[in-house]
Image (cartoon, rainbow, N blue to C red):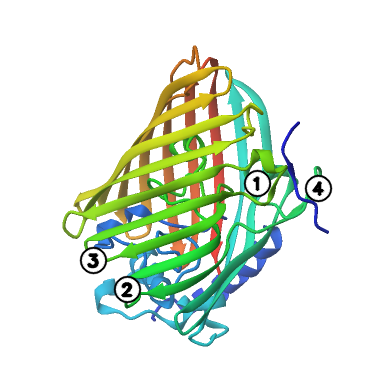
Amino acid sequence: MSPRLVKRTQRRPKASWAVALLLGVAFFVMAPRAQAYPWMIRHGYTGCVACHADPSGGGLLTPYGRAQSELLMSSRYGHAPAEEEEASRFSGPLFGVVTPPDALLVGGWLRSGYIWNTADGKLVDRRFLLMRADLGAQVKVGHFRANGTLGIASAGSRAQSQQASLSSSADGANLISREHWLGVDLADDTVLLRAGRLNLPFGLRNIEHTSWVRSETRTDYNQGQQHGVAVAYNSAAFRTEGMLIAGNYQLHPDAYRERGLTGFAELALGEHNAVGASVLVTRANADVATSKETFRQAHGVFARLSFWRPLVFLAEADALVTSTSGAGTAVGYTGLLQADYEVVRGVHLALTGEGLRRPKSGAVGGVGGWATVSWFFLPHFDARLDVVRRSGLGAPDTMTYLAQLQGYL
């Protein structure tokens, strides 16, 4: 038996508006993931709720979040400091072409790239990737919200999107929905209760969804969402979210659906530093990797630290515990340490180290290193180049080169 997917049929150069609009149109035709940047803590954002509809980060941006994307993240091109400016109309949906009512949030994510992979120095894969092409919206009436995304995933990115699929084409594009939920705001909007398909609240919500801390804990938010009920609390110094997991109902048969709980709590240590802890406990009648009854746990700590505004350290360490029917219990670990340095406004250099030992008998450890350059050249647009080397795990050494162009409409 193997898992299958359900089958269902303000001031700026005068040219910037035109250039950005043309880029956006071209990008939508040729083509990203719902973006969250934990390093925004360098600007004093210890929480995510002010900028994102999802209280734990990522997904649709609020009008305030759109404004900060322009003022704090993008290259300035000789403009006055962000603190002396207000966001322009360009920060609005479709670059200000439309002005939705206050009750409606809309957005679109576009990401494409080209990847080269080598193993033991030999080229094994190179191809163009349509990584994401999604639209999203949220309607809020009083204290109630309805939020969801809908998009297309290409055959080339199937491995990184199939658990979010609504259709089941093996050799063509698929319709996908990463998130869809209903929610109600409580306690003067400090608490959000939600039910639906949600990002799992665990660890750093970093955009490197293939990093081991995300893929091995199955908490990436490219496709790792689950259906369930979650409650989140946010204040100036403390934020937390817990979720009861009912399973991924876009994955079939039912035996492969994990059920359990997950959550995190994070405490702000001043304006630019925060530490937290996470827990995840699930059980499946048949694990997607082994088809055996599996009890899976991940317990970890994480931190976001900025002692000097241009430099942010992101760290996460997780213990992995897996109990498999007929094979007993095994313990492993994974960890990540990233240093993000903003050279000038909008240009980032990042170095990331990671380690992994999978929880299985006889497992050997592995290490990885990432070198990243990213440039937020226009509001809501960035170009990124990653070079990733991984070794160990009983497999050949690999090198990955990935060039990406990303946009948020």
Amino acid marked by disc 1: Gln
Nearer the observer, 113 or 305? 305
The answer to whether 261 appears left or right of 277 in the picture is right
Numbered mark located on residue 236 in the image: 3
- Determine the CA span between mark 2 and mark 1: 44 Å
Residue drawn at x 62%, y 34% as measured from the top left:
285
Q: Residues within 10 Å of mark 3 (few under 14, many from 20)?
A: few
x%, y% of residue 224?
56, 47
Quadrant housing the C terminus: bottom right
Residue wearing tag 1: 163
Numbered mark located on residue 169 in the image: 4
Give the vertical position of 281 relative to 135 (above or below): above
Q: Is the Cβ of the residue at disc 2 closer than 8 Å to that at disc 1?
A: no
Residue drawn at x 60%, y 29% as measured from the top left:
293
Residue wearing tag 2: 79
x%, y% of residue 89?
46, 83
Which tag, 2 or 1, sits closer to the chain's start? Answer: 2
Element type where label 3 sits in the image: loop
